């Protein structure tokens, strides 16, 4: 690790130690966590739920890709996207506190709170992560083959994350959501989430939320306003968070051998419980 990396690591550790007591207090108040590995469809699910709750709780605004964090905040201290942005902290809004996170499982951080866990075909996840790293964040410059072996972003990171949460979900209330099912059947998927949260779904409100969160509408919002905290070329389709909005398109960007490698590594490295989670996507493991 070079000197710059050591300094960055030290800053991150100081921030983590500083923020952790605040995060544990927030976790204790949370109605649920929404957890996923990056690039599993979280932006879409957060936005869809925020549209539903903004209307059902009469918040007085239609969310965009910034104000969505006021309804479902990140599990962090960011003033725009994090816990302190939550609109339910002020006023009389009847709004559940759903904290959204990509963090690996840690019992002392997530406590015993219920979890909504979002899962997606790992081949599509890797492709989306590749474009996020190369075009959105510009933090990686290699090809797909190199990306698969990159320890921070590639297959080892994905399987390690899924193993940690597969163990963490055992014995706690949780609801599994697959991106593929949400794409094909958004109404029953969101109704199931609301039921898990103890919220009676309002059919008309749910239908309007699903319509508001259609891919093209969200892509237009992203092109217009971007994502807070991110500076990127919003005219480049492959750099957008709203990049594809489809399932099973990995074959456009990785070879058949690379796609097989992803599944082979999942079979070899994932725990039986993690493989069960992944089976919800409908892939053959």
Image (spheres, rainbow, N blue to C red):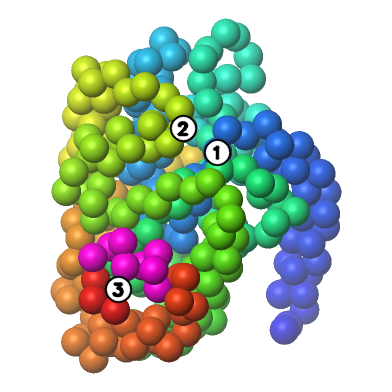
3 and 1 marks in contact (CB < 8 Å): no
Which residue is under mark 3? 123
Which residue, as the protein is rendered here, is positioned at the far front? Answer: 171
Q: Can residue 140 be seen in this view?
A: no
Pick the residue in front: 5 or 206.
206
Is 215 left, or right, of 169 in this rendering?
A: left
Q: How crowded is mark 1: few (under 14 residues within 10 Å), some or many (20 or more)?
A: many
Name the one closer to the observer, 204 or 54: 204
x 58%, y 33%: residue: 31
* For the residues bearing labels 2 and 1, Cβ distance under 8 angstroms: yes
Q: Residue at x 29, y 49 (%)?
A: 242
Looking at the rendered structure, the secondary structure element under dot 2 is: loop
Residue at (75% x, 53% y) in the render: 108
Residue lying farthest to the bottom in this orientation: 257
Marking on residue 111:
none
Label 2: few (<14), some (14–19) or many (≥20) C-alpha neighbours in 10 Å: some
Q: Which contiguous range is marked in magenta?
A: 275-282
Pick the front one: 188 or 243: 188
Label 3 environment density (alpha carbons within 10 Å; few <14, some 14–19, many ≥20): many
Vertical arrangement, residue 98 with respect to residue 251, above or below: above
Residue 193's spot in the image, x, y percent?
Answer: 38, 37
Foreground pick, 60 / 203:
203
Disc number lying in front (3 or 1): 1
Report helix, strand or loop for mark 3: helix
- Give how far apart the Cα atoms at labels 2 and 1 are: 8 Å
Residue 111 x, y percent position in the rendering: 69, 48
* Residue at image coords 23%, 76%: 284
Mark 1, residue position: 32
* Residue 213 coordinates in the image, percent (x, y): 26, 34
Instruction: Pick the quarter of the image with the C terminus.
Output: bottom left
Disc 2: which residue: 197
């Amino acid at each position: 690790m070079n000197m710059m990396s050591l300094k960055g690591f030290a800053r991150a550790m100081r921030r983590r130690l500083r923020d952790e007591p605040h995060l544990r207090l927030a976790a204790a108040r949370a109605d649920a966590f929404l957890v996923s590995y990056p690039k599993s469809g979280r932006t879409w699910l957060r936005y869809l739920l925020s549209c539903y709750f903004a209307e059902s709780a009469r918040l007085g605004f239609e969310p965009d890709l910034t104000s969505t964090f006021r309804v479902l905040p990140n599990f962090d201290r960011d003033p725009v996207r994090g816990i302190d942005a939550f609109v339910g902290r002020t006023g009389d809004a009847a709004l559940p506190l759903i904290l959204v996170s990509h963090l690996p499982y840690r019992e002392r951080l997530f406590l015993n709170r219920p979890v909504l866990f979002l899962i997606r075909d790992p081949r599509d996840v890797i492709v989306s992560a590749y474009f996020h790293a190369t075009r959105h964040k510009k933090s990686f410059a290699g090809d797909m083959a190199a990306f698969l072996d990159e320890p921070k972003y590639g297959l080892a990171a994905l399987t390690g994350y899924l193993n940690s949460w597969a163990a963490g979900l055992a014995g706690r209330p949780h609801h599994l959501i697959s991106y593929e099912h949400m794409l094909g059947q958004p109404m029953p998927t969101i109704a199931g989430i609301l039921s898990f949260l103890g919220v009676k779904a309002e059919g008309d409100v749910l239908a309007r939320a699903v319509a508001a969160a259609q891919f093209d509408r969200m892509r237009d919002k992203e092109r217009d306003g971007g994502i807070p905290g991110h500076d990127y070329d919003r005219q480049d389709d492959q750099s957008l968070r709203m990049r594809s909005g489809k399932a099973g398109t990995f074959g456009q960007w990785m070879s058949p051998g690379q796609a097989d490698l992803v599944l082979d590594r999942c079979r070899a490295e994932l725990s039986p419980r993690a493989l069960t989670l992944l089976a919800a996507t409908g892939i053959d493991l």
